[in-house]
Amino acid sequence: MLIKEIQLRNYDYASRHGLSERIARKRLVKQGFKVYRGIGFFGFKAIKVDYPAVVNKYKELESELTGRLGYSLFAIQLALGSAKGIPDFLCLSDKEIVFVEVKLEHESIKPHQLRVMRVLEDFGFKVMVFRLKQKVFRIETEVSEGQRKVLLVQHKLRRRR
């Protein structure tokens, strides 16, 4: 699993609602990925017929992934059990398939999200966490099995007096 820290710009945002996802999506598209909502990946059959363009987009995604992986996505759905904890984005490029979870600096990754990330890694997918912060301490960190505590709680550094 890979953690990437991205710096927020230094001005007041009118609203932080959806901010982290907007910034991450722009960055991923700039890097050449097709970006899909993670929950849409597993739940597109439940989308109402009122949005046929969205349904067609996810049907196209499913057929492309089934062709690349060689097995149905239903196997992943069974292993996960529910849609709870699925990363924010599923990103496709010509070479790789990546799941991306996006967090602002004060948000932490929940245990059920971590469980889902482990299952996705067991299936061979690359999983990344984007952390948006005012001050970036490390640009990129590879997280191994023993270091997973880093993801759950992010402590603020305090100055000593």
Image (cartoon, helix red, strand yellow):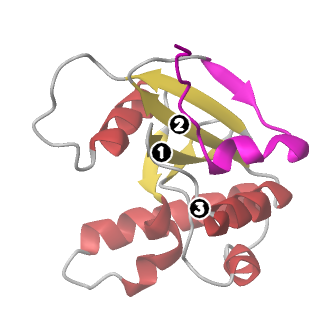
As for residue 155 lying within the magenta part, the answer is yes
Q: Position of residue 60 (x, y in %)?
A: 48, 63
Residue type, mark 3 in image: Lys
Q: Is residue 48 above or below residue 12?
A: below
Q: Quadrant of the N terminus?
A: top right
Q: Does the CB distance between marks 2 and 3 fall below 8 Å?
A: no
The residue indicated by pointer 1 is: 102
Q: Residues within 10 Å of mark 2 (few under 14, many from 20)?
A: many
Question: Which residue is depicted at the point 53% across and 26% down?
Answer: 5
The residue indicated by pointer 3 is: 110
Spatial separation of the CA atoms under disc 1 and disc 2: 5 Å
Q: Nearer the viewer, residue 49 or 85?
A: 85
Q: Is residue 12 above or below residue 113?
A: above
Disc 3 element = loop
Q: Does the CB distance between marks 1 and 2 fall below 8 Å?
A: yes
Q: Nearer the viewer, residue 15 or 65?
A: 15
Question: Which residue is depicted at the point 56% across and 15% down?
Answer: 160
Is residue 66 visible in the rendered image? The answer is no
Q: Quadrant of residue 91?
A: top right
Disc 2 element = strand
Q: Which residues are magenta?
A: 138-161
Left-right relation of 16 to 33:
left
Spatial separation of the CA atoms under disc 2 and disc 3: 15 Å
Q: Residues within 10 Å of mark 3 (few under 14, many from 20)?
A: few
Residue type, mark 1 in image: Val
Spatial separation of the CA atoms under disc 1 and disc 3: 12 Å
Question: Which residue is depicted at the point 55% across and 77% down?
Answer: 83
- The circle on residue 130 is 2
Disc 1 element = strand
